[in-house]
Image: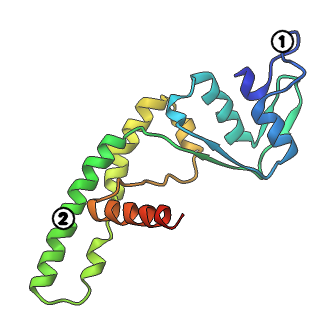
Amino acid sequence: VAKFIGSPPGYVGHEEGGQLTKQLKHCPNAVVLFDEVDKAHPDVLTIMLQLFDEGRLTDGKGKTIECKDAIFIMTSNAASDEIAQHALQLRQEAQEQSRRRLAENLEDVQKSEKITISNTFKEQVIRPILKAHFRRDEFLGRINEIVYFLPFCHSELIQLVSKELNYWAKK
């Protein structure tokens, strides 16, 4: 926590300030990435709760830093196994639909490749996992948007590897 917002008066490093508060003071409209927030200490989550609720932070020196113009992005691997399993199921359904369309000679076969996670799955499967992990409804309630990323399918991996190999072959 001290590295995050700065050490309180009387502690070593008090004059240096915190990594987050120092940067937000200089650039209040920053884009801040909290990578793997699911591994954060509960005290850090408490500070983030204040940050997201009030749009400001109080540093170790007692100064308030306005953060309402900053954009905060968090990554998490919580529920990643469930999402991966669900993605497999969705891809199988999409392939089956694609086969049916081919059999019926429909031209819009490509549309079947787009897969999305249903709101029901998000609310009934993912949300409870996030609630259990973070143990705070108010923390999740302050998140404006959750973006879900599905694992790459086989064809996407081939495309990605080909692109990367071509890039390195040109160097």
- The residue tagged with tag 2: helix, strand or loop? helix
Residue matched to label 2: 93
Residue 31 in the image: above or below residue 102 = above
Quarter-wise, where is residue 161 in the image?
Answer: bottom left
User: Residue most toward the top?
Assistant: 10
Q: Residue at x 32, y 54 (%)?
A: 120
Q: CA distance from mark 1 to mark 2?
A: 58 Å
Of 45 and 15, nearer the camera is 15
Amino acid type, label 1: Val
**Residue 3 visible at all:** yes
Q: Are marks 1 and 2 in contact (CB under 8 Å)?
A: no
Q: Position of residue 141 (x, y in %)?
A: 55, 43
Residue 7 in the image: above or below residue 36 = above
Quarter-wise, where is residue 19 in the image?
Answer: top right
Quarter-wise, where is residue 63 in the image?
Answer: top right
Asked if residue 43 lies left or right of residue 62, the reply is left
Of 22 and 164, nearer the camera is 164
Question: How many circles with numbers are drawn on the protein?
Answer: 2
Residue 60 in the image: above or below residue 148 = above
Q: Residue at x 80, y 35 (%)?
A: 21
Amino acid type, label 2: Glu
User: Residue most toward the left?
Assistant: 103
Quarter of the image with the N terminus is: top right
Q: Which mark is residue 136?
A: none
Residue matched to label 1: 12
